[in-house]
């Protein structure tokens, strides 16, 4: 990867931290809270329910390529400070931890990225463990800030990028949260907003008209990421 100096330094630091976690038996664990739930960046050797405190899931990060365009930016989820968030821990094989981190970084932080990666303490039934998570500073230019419903509806109607629409991204995340038994009031409200304005319906919300690979829990981009790991 050809990264700007600051991004390269950050990645190097994360690798150093990972080496410490490997020595302590934690390994590489990633906190999945949105698209990583339904399109993992690698083939986890284990997934376990987890919660982080001090951060919450929010559809507040501008997307000008993947889920929108410069003319009509879309939105993707990020972890913002405050509250708590339920998701999953995805554990990578220890033998491939550093290669997995590089592949994950390439997906989540292209060209240096927007997210601020950090290690968060995640609570599970087995106790608390550190996991890598992708957060967003509220003073970052890509932070959308609070949006009126009319603004959100315009984005859900019109924003579409190389990986599809913001609406599709929201619905896929909602479907996966439902499957995992995770109740997120903010996500449910956005889905209800879209449904109430005719942008979707209950059938689609539950995934019955999603592409076949999504219903099956598979995604072509996921396979591409795993293939890159296998070549290393």
Image (cartoon, rainbow, N blue to C red):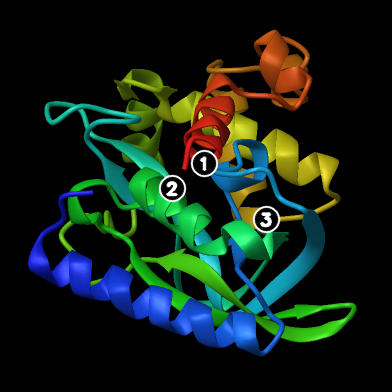
Name the image quarter holding residue 191: top right
Percent x, y for residue 125? 89, 78
Residues at badges 1 and 3 in contact (C-beta under 8 Å)? no
Left or right relative to 27: residue 68 = left
Task: Inspect this view and state whether residue 193 appears.
Answer: no
Label 1, label 3: how far apart the Cα atoms are: 36 Å
Residues at badges 2 and 3 in contact (C-beta under 8 Å)? no
Task: Inspect this view and state whether residue 205 appears.
Answer: yes
Percent x, y for residue 180? 83, 48
Depicted 95 relative to depicted 80: above or below? above
Question: Which residue lies under the disc numbered 3?
Answer: 185
Q: Secondary structure at mark 3?
A: helix
Percent x, y for residue 133? 50, 67
Image point 16% across, 56% down: which residue? 3
Badge 2 or badge 3: first in the primary sequence: 2
Residues at badges 2 and 1 in contact (C-beta under 8 Å)? yes
Q: Is the residue marked by circle 3 packed among few (<14), some (14-19), or many (20+) residues within 10 Å?
A: few
Question: Which residue lies under the disc numbered 2?
Answer: 103
Image point 48% across, 27% down: which residue? 167
Q: Nearer the viewer, mark 2 or mark 3?
A: 2
Left or right relative to 180: residue 26 = left
Image point 56% across, 20% down: which residue? 220
Name the image quarter holding residue 141: bottom left
Percent x, y for residue 224? 50, 27
Badge 2 or badge 1: first in the primary sequence: 2
Q: Is the residue marked by circle 2 packed among few (<14), some (14-19), or many (20+) residues within 10 Å?
A: some
Label 2, label 1: how far apart the Cα atoms are: 7 Å
Image point 58% across, 57% down: which residue? 96
Q: Residue 229 got which mark?
A: 1
Say which of 19 and 144 sits in front.
Answer: 19
Depicted 99 relative to depicted 30: above or below? above
């Amino acid at each position: 990867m050809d990264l700007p100096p600051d991004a390269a330094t950050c990645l190097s630091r994360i690798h150093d931290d990972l080496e410490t976690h490997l020595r302590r038996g934690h390994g590489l664990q990633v906190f999945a809270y949105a698209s990583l739930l339904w399109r993992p960046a690698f083939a986890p050797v284990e997934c376990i329910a987890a919660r982080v405190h001090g951060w919450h899931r929010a559809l507040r990060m501008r997307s000008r390529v993947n889920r929108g365009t410069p003319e009509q930016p879309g939105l993707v989820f990020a972890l913002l400070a405050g509250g708590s968030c339920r998701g999953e821990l995805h554990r990578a094989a220890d033998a491939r931890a550093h290669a997995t981190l590089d592949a994950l970084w390439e997906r989540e932080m292209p060209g240096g990225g927007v997210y601020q990666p950090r290690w968060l303490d995640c609570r599970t039934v087995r106790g608390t463990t550190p996991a890598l998570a992708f957060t967003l500073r509220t003073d970052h230019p890509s932070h959308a800030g609070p949006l009126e419903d009319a603004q959100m509806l315009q984005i859900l109607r019109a924003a579409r990028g190389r990986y599809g629409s913001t609406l599709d991204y929201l619905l896929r995340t909602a479907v996966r949260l439902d499957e995992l038994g995770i109740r997120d009031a903010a996500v449910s409200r956005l889905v209800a907003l879209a449904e109430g304005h005719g942008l979707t319906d209950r059938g689609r919300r539950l995934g019955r008209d999603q592409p076949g690979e999504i219903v099956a829990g598979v995604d072509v981009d996921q396979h591409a990421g795993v293939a890159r790991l296998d070549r290393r």
